[in-house]
Image (cartoon, grey):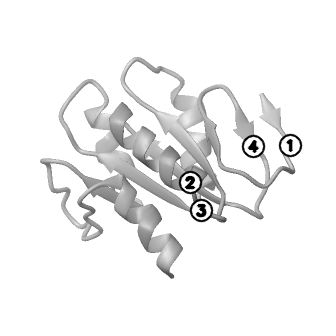
Amino acid sequence: MVKNFVRDYTNFITPPDFIERKDQHSVLLVDVDDGEVKDIATLCKNVDSSYDIYLYHKGMSDTEWLTRVADTVDHIIVNTDTNELSSIKDKLVTRPNASYYGPKTPLGNVNRLDSPLIYFIKLLND
């Protein structure tokens, strides 16, 4: 479902929803732990910046939605823990707009993060 929001706050978006706009920084979080998502939400609640944050994790199966989102977001952050999403995550992390964190180091990607929260902190400081 495509939604057109004009409000200026951070949106956390899951399948099948999609927000069509280009005026707000967008990030896809793939297989990010709940605690890390909560940390990002807390940060976003306390700053003036706003984001469209797409969430995809174990148990989700809408790979068409995932591909559409990955093709349109400004940045992708992938948790490299090994699980049933590993083959999808291995492909996403090779994109030029991708960063990763976790135990596995993908070949050709030097955009390592200590955590997804670090990405948002860096955005705020730029």
Q: CA distance from mark 3 to mark 4?
A: 21 Å
Placement of 122 over or under 65, stated as above or below: below
- Which quadrant would residue 49 be assigned to in this image? bottom right
- Name the mark nearer the viewer: 4 or 2: 2
Which numbered tag is attached to residue 4? 1
Q: Can residue 97 be seen?
A: no
In this view, the residue in front, 106 or 40, is 40
For mark 2, does the 10 Å Cα neighbourhood hold few (<14), some (14 to 19), or many (20 or more) residues? some
**Helix, strand or loop for disc 4:** strand
- Name the mark nearer the viewer: 3 or 4: 3
- Which quadrant would residue 13 be assigned to in this image? top right
Q: Amino acid at mark 4?
A: Ile
Q: Amino acid at mark 1?
A: Asn
Q: Amino acid at mark 2?
A: Cys
Residue that badge 4 annotates: 19
Q: CA distance from mark 2 to mark 1?
A: 20 Å
Please say if the residues under marks 1 and 4 sit with CB atoms less than 8 Å apart: yes
Sequence-first tag of 1 and 3 = 1
Q: CA distance from mark 3 to mark 2?
A: 5 Å
In this view, the residue in front, 12 or 3, is 12
For mark 4, does the 10 Å Cα neighbourhood hold few (<14), some (14 to 19), or many (20 or more) residues? some
